[in-house]
Image (cartoon, helix red, strand yellow):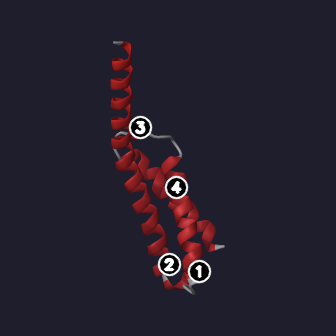
Amino acid sequence: MEIIYVTVIGAGIGLVLRYLLPHRASYGLVLLPCASAAVTAAIWAGLTWLGWTPAGGWIWVAALGAALAIALVLGLVLPAQRRTADERALAEAVASRS
């Protein structure tokens, strides 16, 4: 049952970071929340199989920390890659016109 709670919280972390990080127009509306939720659920399931219990507290920190980390990485890396890809596509389009 706790996996549902932690996954929803992980998605919430991704949603909040989507609006806190700059250049959010460079990626989709649900990318960060979905990625955060998926990573949170995967980490939670993996740690549960390793014997970590929800009562311990560290499983919560690890799963939600992974949600925060993936949202930060995606939110900061994707806009830069998108900008580079757009500039490259523009340069190719201009070069092909001449």
**Is the residue marked by circle 4 packed among few (<14), some (14-19), or many (20+) residues within 10 Å?**
some
Task: Identify the residue position indicated by label 3 in the image.
Answer: 26
Which residue sits furthest top? Answer: 98
Amino acid on which the number 1 mark rests in the picture: Thr
Quarter holding residue 80: top left
Judged by depth in the image, the label closer to the viewer, 3 or 2, is 3
Residue 48: horizontal and vertical position, in percent? 59, 80
What is the CA distance from the residue labelled 2 to the residue labelled 4?
18 Å
Report the side of 45 relative to 60 (left or right): right
What is the CA distance from the residue labelled 1 to the residue labelled 2?
8 Å
The answer to whether 45 is drawn above or below residue 55 in the figure is: above
Q: Is mark 4 on a helix, strand or loop?
A: helix
Q: In which quarter of the image is the C terminus?
A: top left
Q: Do the numbered discs 1 and 2 sit on residues whose CB atoms are within 8 Å?
A: yes
Q: Quadrant of the N terminus?
A: bottom right
Residue 54: horizontal and vertical position, in percent? 56, 81
Q: Residue at x 60, y 74 (%)?
A: 45
Q: Do the numbered discs 3 and 1 sit on residues whose CB atoms are within 8 Å?
A: no
Marks 3 and 2, the one that precedes in the sequence: 3
Residue 2: horizontal and vertical position, in percent? 61, 73
Q: Do the numbered discs 3 and 2 sit on residues whose CB atoms are within 8 Å?
A: no
Quarter holding residue 73: bottom left
What is the CA distance from the residue labelled 3 to the residue labelled 2?
32 Å
Report the side of 86 relative to 37 (left or right): left
**Is the residue marked by circle 2 packed among few (<14), some (14-19), or many (20+) residues within 10 Å?**
many
